[in-house]
């Protein structure tokens, strides 16, 4: 660019020089002509007179002066005859040759030839050309320098712009150019900076959006991973299909339900076709096909009976996107075979006594009510035998619960062998049994009672190297002779049984109204007096039994168990003998508060004890001042509320659900945990869990004692554990008396255990 500019400048200067030279020549010629025109009259005037007079000396003198003064290089004068008169100087080839006629009065008398010298003009012309040349050179150099400087300045700024653009394109988003200049390049810099700001902001926005999208993608992938993991652990078979019915996803449970060996090959296939290819035979394929063909009823669960005996439920749910448009379906398959079996087993357990396998009290009450309804229709007579074992408490207390359980099982077996058609044997609880004869007279009842008394008395027992015999007392009540409703019939049979005991035991008696001194009334009065004496004379004592974590065998807490002394040095009386009486008389409220105050005092004096669990009776659940009393005791003794726990029996809680809910909520808000004791004894135990917000479920001992011999009990315990864990609750198993039971409970997932195998109740050391 610089060379091109210099060439252009040289051409321009050359044109200017040529124009100047031409103009100068023209001016020189005009100047010469002007001189000639000026010299003509002068020369003619000066020379004409001298030539006319032939004054040669004057002519020579005059020619010398003219040549000297007027810049004429050569003069030659001839007369009119052509004779040379005079010459001056030498002729020069580059002079301007002129001829001037010499006239006097218009008469030519001679001719003067002269050469006008142009040396001065030529020198001036040369000087002008030389000066013009140097001016041109200087101009070109200056222009070149200026152009070079300008080019460098412009190129430098343009290069800065170029380098900035290149750096920006390579990721240097913070580069900016100076905006101090206001020329075109400065405007380019401003435009570049504006562009860079805009692009940087757009790139930042894109990075932010990219970060958000990446976070959303990561979140979506994490959610997908969690969903996939969740679906993989579910027992429900899950199948996602698109709007065309093609399979998008199936979880392992679905693959297992349909026995699919290569589930990954199903994806993309029609779900109906894939299920047909699974090889699993349906007992009623047409029902399944009709279910799929009826969109309006597909949301309803269909039970699919498999040829292999399994029962599968199938439910379909439509999946919608955020715009509410259907994007596919969720097919849910649930193998309910085991739950159906478990339900049957639960029904069996609800109707049966877990220890003996006999019908339980619930079944007895249900059957007795049905019998009276049937009697009202048919007017047929019947009988009730009420059986109580004599001396059973001695076996239980002396040889332990295991011996007591064995005794009950053997006696139940013997009595079952005596039962005929139309007769049903029940275990009502503890050592009490009942036989209901739907159609029988007095003779039938007496015969059966005699056979039972004799059979029980003949059963040999051997515990700890001792031969033991046990007897029974049986009361007989007839209907409609002795009672016209179930409740009175039971009380009459119980009174007759008490009459048999008063007669010396090991016998039976038919109810006689004149001898009806109710055993319950007598016992209630006696025990009520003894309870009052114990409260007044501090004859109650607390024993503590540890509750242990299943896997670590660490003590979780201790349960406070009350005992009674009839006198300071007399053997302790177990609570089973007086608690029911205390509840009937209302003395249980005082007992509960006594246990509470002494347990909290123990916590205050024994900071090493992690926690103590106190049993609350059903009557205390009605005590509106109980929670304030507990809070006052805890505050006064400065006890951490979490160290005090409470156990409420399921039966007590369900007897007044509203009071139980209120008390449990108040205790938990106070910071104390609550256990639901004897859980599982009611048929609707699971249903009431949503109303009773307890922290721990304490499984009733009737499911624990014969756990090794009764597989059905394991099913029930497993169900309780699974439900508890599903609701975020812990479980405790009581009556753990052997290592085998301990091991089985570990396998079933029970959280804590309590029983003679781990720790016998005793005072704290």
Image: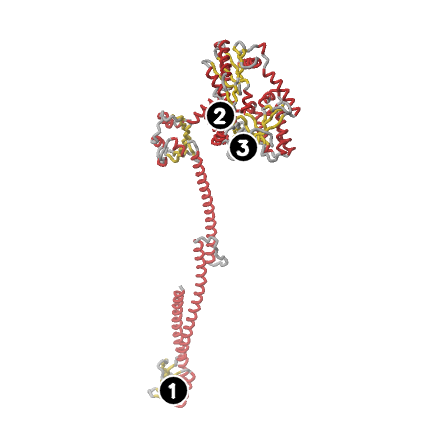
Where disc 1 sits, the SS reads strand
- What residue is pinned by disc 1? 88
Q: Residues within 10 Å of mark 2 (few under 14, many from 20)?
A: many
Residue positioned 47% across, 50% down in the render: 200
Q: CA distance from mark 3 to mark 2?
A: 20 Å
Do residues under tags 3 and 2 come within 8 Å of each other at their CB atoms? no
Q: Residue reaching furthest front?
A: 465
Quarter of the image for the N terminus: give it: bottom left
State which tag comes first along the sequence, 2 or 1: 1
Q: Nearer the viewer, residue 425 or 313?
A: 425
Q: Which residue is mark 3?
A: 548
The reply, left or right, for residue 11 in relation to residue 504 is left
Disc 2 is placed on an element classified as loop
Identity of the residue drawn at 40% across and 65% down: 2
| 237 sits left or right of 364 in the view | left
**Neighbour tally class for label 3: few under 14, some 14-19, many 20 plus, Cα within 10 Å:** many
* Number of the label disc, if any, that sits on residue 706: 2
**Residue 70 placement (x, y as % from top left):** 42, 82
């Amino acid at each position: 660019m610089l060379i091109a500019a210099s060439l252009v400048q040289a051409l321009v200067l050359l044109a200017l020089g040529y124009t100047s030279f031409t103009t100068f020549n023209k001016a020189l010629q005009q100047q010469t002509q002007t001189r000639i025109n000026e010299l003509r009259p002068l020369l003619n005037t000066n020379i004409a007179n001298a030539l006319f007079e032939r004054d040669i000396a004057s002519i020579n003198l005059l020619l010398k002066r003219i040549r000297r003064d007027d810049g004429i290089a050569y003069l030659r004068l001839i007369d009119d005859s052509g004779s040379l008169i005079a010459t001056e100087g030498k002729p020069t080839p580059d002079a301007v040759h002129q001829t001037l006629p010499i006239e006097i009065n218009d008469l030519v008398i001679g001719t003067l030839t002269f050469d006008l010298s142009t040396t001065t003009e030529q020198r001036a012309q040369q000087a002008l050309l030389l000066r013009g040349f140097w001016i041109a050179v200087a101009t070109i150099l200056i222009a070149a320098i200026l152009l070079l400087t300008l080019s460098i300045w412009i190129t430098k700024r343009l290069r800065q712009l170029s380098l900035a653009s290149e750096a920006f394109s390579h990721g240097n988003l913070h580069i900016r150019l100076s905006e101090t200049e206001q020329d075109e390049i400065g405007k380019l810099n401003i435009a570049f900076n504006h562009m860079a700001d805009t692009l940087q902001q757009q790139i930042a926005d894109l990075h932010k959006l990219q970060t958000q999208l990446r976070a959303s993608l990561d979140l979506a992938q994490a959610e997908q991973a969690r969903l996939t993991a969740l679906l993989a652990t579910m027992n429900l078979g899950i199948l996602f299909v698109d709007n065309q019915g093609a399979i998008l996803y199936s979880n392992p449970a679905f693959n297992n339900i349909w026995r699919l060996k290569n589930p990954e090959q199903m994806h993309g296939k029609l779900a109906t076709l894939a299920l047909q290819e699974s090889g699993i035979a349906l007992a009623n394929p047409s029902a399944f096909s009709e279910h799929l063909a009826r969109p309006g009823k597909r949301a309803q669960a269909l039970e699919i009976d498999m040829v292999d005996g399994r029962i599968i439920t199938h439910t379909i749910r439509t999946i919608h996107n955020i715009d509410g448009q259907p994007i596919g379906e969720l097919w849910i398959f649930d193998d309910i075979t085991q739950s159906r079996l478990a339900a049957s087993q639960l029904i069996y357990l609800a109707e049966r006594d877990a220890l003996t396998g006999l019908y339980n009290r619930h079944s007895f009450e249900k059957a007795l009510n049905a019998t009276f309804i049937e009697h009202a229709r048919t007017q047929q007579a019947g009988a009730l035998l009420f059986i109580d074992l004599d001396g059973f408490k001695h076996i239980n207390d002396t040889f332990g619960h295991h011996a007591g359980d064995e005794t009950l099982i053997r006696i139940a077996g013997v009595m079952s062998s005596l039962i005929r058609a139309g007769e049903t044997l029940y275990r009502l609880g503890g050592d009490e049994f009942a036989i209901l004869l739907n159609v029988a007279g007095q003779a039938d009842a007496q015969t059966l009672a005699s056979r039972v008394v004799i059979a029980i008395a003949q059963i040999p027992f051997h515990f700890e190297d001792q031969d033991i015999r046990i007897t029974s007392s049986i009361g007989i009540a007839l209907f409609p002779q002795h009672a016209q409703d179930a409740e009175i019939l039971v009380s009459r049979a119980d009174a007759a049984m008490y009459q048999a005991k008063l007669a010396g035991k090991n016998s039976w008696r038919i109810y006689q109204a004149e001898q009806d001194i109710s055993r319950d009334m007598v016992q209630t009065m006696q025990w009520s007096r003894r309870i009052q004496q114990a409260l007044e004379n501090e004859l109650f004592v607390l024993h503590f039994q540890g509750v242990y974590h299943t896997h670590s065998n660490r003590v979780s807490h201790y349960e406070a168990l009350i005992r009674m002394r009839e006198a300071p040095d007399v053997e302790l009386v177990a609570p089973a003998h007086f608690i029911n009486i205390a509840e009937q008389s209302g003395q249980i409220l005082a007992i509960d508060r006594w246990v509470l105050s002494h347990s909290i005092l123990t916590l205050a004096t024994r900071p090493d004890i992690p926690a103590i669990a106190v049993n609350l009776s059903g009557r205390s659940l009605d005590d509106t001042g109980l929670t304030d009393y507990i809070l006052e005791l805890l505050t006064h003794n400065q006890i951490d509320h979490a160290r005090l726990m409470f156990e409420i029996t399921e039966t007590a809680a369900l007897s007044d659900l509203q009071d139980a809910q209120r008390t449990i909520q108040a205790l938990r808000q106070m910071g104390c945990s609550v256990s639901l004791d004897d859980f599982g004894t009611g048929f609707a135990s699971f249903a009431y869990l949503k109303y009773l917000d307890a922290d721990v479920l304490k499984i009733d001992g009737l499911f624990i004692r014969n756990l090794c011999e009764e597989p059905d009990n394991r099913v029930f315990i497993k169900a309780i554990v699974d439900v508890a864990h599903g609701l975020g609750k812990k479980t405790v198993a009581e009556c753990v008396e052997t290592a085998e039971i301990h091991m089985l409970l570990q396998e079933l997932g029970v959280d804590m255990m309590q029983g003679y195998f781990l720790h016998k109740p005793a005072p704290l050391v």
